[in-house]
Every structure is written in C-alpha cells, then in structure tokens.
C-alpha cells in the first residue's frame, strides 16, 4: 500500500518539514522570542523549564519575518503586530502567547490555519483594567484631570469645573465580559474567545460602580438575562443601552462587528450630555465622530485609554487635546507590584501566566487561555481522549482504503458525550490527512488546530451527527464520500473491566453503567457495511471474499455476510504485504478488495 497517496487528490501533499510530537514532549531546548517588554518572571519561568529565550523589543516587521522561523514560540503584548505574513514564516512555531487579553494584534485565523495555538491571559489584568475604567469614570464626572491641569497652570477655577454625581446615574455597559462584570469567559460576538477556559475573575467595573450608587444596564448577546439580573444588571439591547446611559463604557474586543460601534449614528441616539469611556480597544469608538460630538456638546465628556493607532497618529491629537476628553496612554493593565510584595499585579501576573502556558503547550499538557483551538482544549478532557484517538485511527484506516479525492466526511457519534462530534471530526481529519501525507503549504503536518480549516479550504464538506449506537452504548462511525463512491468504518472503545470493580451483571439484568464507559481499547466494529470486531493495531490483511468452503477465510475475524454472501475478513499479520502480492490475492476467485492496513 503506497504511503503517500496523492490519490486523496483533494489534499495538497508536499514533503513534511515539521511534525508534531506525539508524546514525551517537553519545553526543554525550545526557543522563544519575547518581542515586547515583559516582566522578568516570564523569562525566569521559561529558562527554568529549559527554554532558550531571546528578548528583542521593537523588532521591525521585516526583521521579525526574517527571524521568526528560528522560534518554537512567540510572546507578545500589544506592541507587536503578528501578521499573516509573519505567521507564514513561522515554520517551527507551536504557540503564540499574548501576555494580556486583547488578541486583535495577532492574526488568529492565519495561526489556526498553520496549526499554531494562540493563548492569552485574560484573568491576569482584569482587576487593573476594571480599576482604571472606574478611575476614568470618576475623573470624568468630577473633572479631575482638567482641574489638575488648570491648577498646574497656576489657576484657581472652581466654577469652570462643576461636575455631576455618579449616584443615581445610569451606567450602560456594552459587553459583560471579564472586565465589565465578574465572568468566566470573555465573549462578545467572538466565537474564538468563547472557547477559552480561564480561571474565574475577581469583581470588576460593575460591582465597583454599583457601590457609587449607579444603576447598571448591560448588553451582551452571550450573557443570559437571568444571570444579569442576579448581578443587579438590567439586561437591555445594545440600542437601549446606548439610549439610556448617562455614562457609557465599552468592554468588547475589537472585531469586524464591533469596529466603530460608537459612531455618529449611534451617538445621535444617546442622551444629550452622555459621557463615554473606552478602556477596551481603539477603533470601537469612531474617533472623528466622537470629536464632532464633543465639539457640538452632545457628548459632555469622554475618557479614552486606547487609540486606533498607538502611539496616536497626527490626526488623532485633535481628539486627545479636546478639553472635555481625558486621555491616558493605554494604561489599563499598567500595574506592577512593589518590590518584595507577596502578590503580583497585572504585569507580573500576565508574565507569569503566559510563561506557564507556553511551557505547558510545549509539553502538550492542558493549557489555559487558548483562544483559537477549541478542539485542542476538548482533546485534553479525560473523557474525550479515547474518542480523539479512535477517530484518528479510523481516519487513518479510511485513508488507506480510499484511493480517490475525498469530497465529504460524515461523522456520526453515539454516546451523548458533549462536543464529541466536533472533536472526532477534527481528529478523523488529522488521521485522514496524516495518513495521506498531506501538509500545509509550508510543509507543516495537519493537526487538531488546523485540520478543520485545511478541509474547508479544500472544499471538503464535514458534517457531524448524533445517532443511536444500536448494540453499542458509544459508537463512532465515519463515512468518506468520493466521486468514486463512499467508504464506511465504525468503531468503539472498550474500557478495561476489572473483575472486582465491575462484576458481570446477573443474567437478564441491565448492564452496569461502568460497562458502558468509552475506553481506550479500540475496536473496529463495522467495515464497509460489514459488522465484525477487530483491534486496529499493527499490520492487518483485510479482504472481501465469498463465504463458501475453500475460500481464504481461515484464521481471520470474519464479518457477517451480506445479501450477496460476501464477508470481510481481517487477519493480523506481522509485516507489511507488498502491493504486488495484494494484487495477486485480489485475482483469486471470490476474493476482492484486498488491503494491507497499518496502525502504528
Ligand atoms: O489587552 C490587554 O491585555 C490590555 O489592553 C493591555 O495591553 P498591553 O499588554 O499592551 O499593556
């Protein structure tokens, strides 16, 4: 059986330049570039794990593109823009770590396509960002910054800086993620972030501003209204949030959906005298429209920590210099513990968290804060590990049987395990592509992160379906369709059954739940429509024959016969059978479809 069937013509097959390690992986000897200023704790943790660390700030993009191929990992803050072009040259890269929250400076789609994990540290700077937001709200209400500047100009102008109370005012919060409220996921129209699994965050903007006596209304399409009410937040639509707020604060990531969400049209729906705060990302508020609204007086004041260009471009200074605007230079996460302090503050926390995540990613251990690889996160769950392994094996077997371009893969799962279908589809694709020798355009092997995008690019339709498993409590069935027909394989995973812990149930009794656990001992239970049972392991001679005396079907696992009297025979063998021998065997009377399959 040829090992490199470009026969799976839908795949772009090139020679492998890189393959992911499958076990015993470690951070030792990996090379990491840190391209933005970061606390020393990050370097210390990496070096302790045996990682070689280079710290180079302000590397010009062209230079970064040139050197990035040397590194297994990259750590950035918001100062480095990691473009698709840079990712394209990152031939050895396993993971990109963002020491902070926003990943809008990283091309996550390009990283996903290349099978690179992108991770952030959303919990690390939540408190600092929330506190800075609150500081800006309070200083906006009482003209703290303007009063200070006036006094420094040796003026005593009490009348000019008349403020407003916060008590009894309505605070509108767009985006009830970590900073907006206490949350366990950062999620505003951001499907990638929905999958990040991060530790719970401490109390944020809302609880602090409620203690000033503000009434809080909030909009977030992913936050259940009942949960909002429990936090004393009135759930409202985005339009209502903007229309009713006296103070409006945005806590959303910068996405196509959220770019310019505060603009002249939405500002026109707001109350005259509204005050607006942006401590999230430059670009969420249209800066020219905000300036016009400050000039007209419709917006009474604004506080901005983040800008479309950082440092600001020439045209942005007119907004920054407006007397009703309080500006800070992206200080949301800028807190550092005093020397010798026992607890870290934002910069220390994100540095520590990202270093630990990178070490874990290199060691193929569970990683916190993955933003672009839901399947990787799922595959680390103990209950889903056997499904991943089985799906990969079945995908490999199908790739060995199939000779034509795959146009679709159908994944049917029974067993009521949440997300198993999605994960099995990615794992089956990994098996199919890996067995076919498929590589991405840079020669990288296809992995759980890149497989769905790789299939989609090749217009391979992948569907998942939850089905009844029949006699099996858990079953995984794969069907690949090609212009020449389809191939089907199904399998299950047997759990080890100890004689004491799981006694055989009395005759007639229902099987004990322990017996229905999906385990790691793989069995193929259906092959090309024939029911049988064999362990996919080592070399296997598989062929179809007519079930009649004298036809080669001894010492085999033999399937049930079909309507034509054909059976599938599987024989464990100790070495590879050459293609010429297989062809000869297929010429025997009543024998057909002879394959030598292998699972290493
Ligand atoms: O997204 C973040 O984490 C904050 O905006 C902080 O960004 P910084 O790391 O550039 O300070």
Image: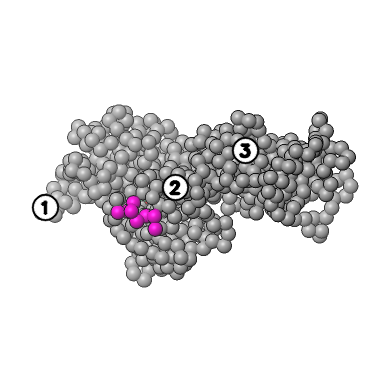
Nearer to us: label 3 or label 2: 3
Rendered residue at 58%/53% (across/down): 380
**Which residue in the rendered view is the most extreme toward the left?**
154
How would you rate the neighbour count of disc 1 (Cα within 10 Å): few for under 14, some for 14-19, many for 20 or more?
Answer: few
Magenta-highlighted residues:
63-70
Rendered residue at 50%/41% (across/down): 12
Query: Is there a contact, CB below 8 Å, between mark 1 and mark 2?
Result: no
Residue topped by disc 3: 403
Q: Marks 3 and 1, how far apart in space?
A: 81 Å
Query: Is there a contact, CB below 8 Å, between mark 3 and mark 1?
Result: no
Asked where in the image residue 487 lies, by quadrant, the reply is top right
Side of 236 where 403 appears, left or right: right
First along the sequence among labels 3 and 1: 1
Question: Is 67 a magenta residue?
Answer: yes
Q: Position of residue 27 (x, y in %)?
A: 48, 63
Front residue of 252/78: it is 78
Residue topped by disc 1: 153
Residue topped by disc 2: 442
Question: Is 194 a magenta residue?
Answer: no
Q: How many marks?
A: 3
């Amino acid at each position: 059986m040829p090992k490199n069937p470009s026969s799976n013509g839908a795949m772009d097959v090139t020679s492998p330049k890189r393959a992911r390690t499958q076990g015993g992986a470690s951070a030792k000897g990996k090379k990491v570039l840190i391209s933005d200023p970061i606390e020393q704790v990050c370097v210390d943790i990496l070096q302790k794990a045996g990682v070689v660390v280079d710290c180079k700030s302000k590397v010009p993009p062209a230079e970064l593109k040139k050197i990035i191929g040397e590194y297994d990992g990259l750590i950035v803050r918001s100062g480095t823009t990691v473009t698709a072009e840079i990712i394209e040259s990152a031939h050895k890269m396993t993971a990109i770590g963002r020491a902070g929250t926003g990943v809008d400076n990283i091309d996550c789609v390009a990283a996903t396509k290349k099978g690179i994990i992108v991770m952030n540290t959303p919990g690390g700077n939540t408190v600092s960002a929330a506190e800075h937001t609150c500081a800006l709200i309070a200083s906006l209400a009482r003209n703290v910054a303007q009063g200070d500047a006036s006094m420094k100009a040796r003026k005593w102008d009490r009348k000019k800086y008349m403020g407003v109370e916060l008590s009894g005012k309505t605070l509108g919060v767009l985006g009830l993620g970590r900073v907006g409220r206490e949350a366990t996921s950062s999620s505003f129209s951001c499907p990638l972030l929905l999958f990040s699994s991060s530790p719970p965050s401490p109390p944020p903007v809302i609880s602090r501003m409620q203690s000033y006596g503000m009434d809080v209304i909030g909009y977030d399409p992913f936050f259940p209204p009942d949960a909002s009410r429990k936090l004393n937040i009135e759930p409202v639509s985005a339009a209502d949030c903007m229309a009713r707020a006296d103070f409006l604060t945005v806590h959303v990531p910068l996405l196509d959906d959220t770019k310019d969400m505060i603009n002249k049209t939405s500002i026109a729906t707001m109350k005259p005298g509204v005050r607006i705060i942006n401590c999230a990302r430059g670009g969420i508020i249209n800066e020219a429209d905000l300036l016009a609204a400050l000039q007209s007086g419709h917006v009474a004041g604004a506080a901005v920590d983040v800008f479309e260009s950082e440092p600001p471009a020439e045209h942005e200074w007119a907004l920054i210099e407006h007397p009703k605007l309080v500006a800070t230079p992206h200080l949301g996460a800028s807190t550092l513990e005093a020397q010798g302090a026992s607890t870290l503050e934002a910069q220390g926390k994100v540095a520590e968290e990202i270093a630990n995540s990178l070490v874990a990613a290199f060691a193929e251990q569970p990683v916190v804060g993955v933003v672009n690889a839901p399947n990787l996160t799922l595959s680390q769950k103990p209950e889903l590990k056997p499904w991943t392994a089985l799906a990969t094996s079945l995908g490999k077997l199908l790739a060995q049987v199939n000779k034509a371009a795959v146009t679709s893969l159908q994944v049917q799962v029974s067993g009521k395990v949440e997300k198993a279908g999605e994960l099995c589809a990615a794992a089956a694709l990994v098996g199919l592509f890996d067995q076919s020798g498929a590589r991405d355009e840079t020669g990288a092997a296809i992995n759980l992160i890149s497989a769905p995008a790789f299939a989609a690019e090749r217009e391979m339709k992948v569907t998942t379906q939850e089905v009844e498993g029949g006699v099996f409590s858990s079953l995984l069935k794969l069907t690949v369709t090609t212009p020449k027909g389809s191939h089907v394989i199904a399998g299950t995973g047997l759990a080890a059954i100890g004689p004491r812990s799981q006694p055989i149930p009395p005759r007639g009794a229902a099987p004990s739940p322990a017996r229905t656990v999906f385990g790691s001992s793989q069995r193929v239970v259906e092959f090309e429509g024939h029911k049988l049972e064999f362990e996919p392991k080592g070399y296997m001679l598989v062929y179809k024959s007519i079930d009649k005396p004298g036809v080669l079907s001894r010492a085999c696992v033999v399937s049930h016969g079909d309507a034509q009297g054909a059976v599938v025979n599987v024989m464990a063998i100790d070495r590879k059978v050459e293609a010429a021998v297989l062809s000869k065997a297929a010429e025997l009377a009543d024998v057909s479809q002879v394959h030598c399959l292998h699972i290493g």
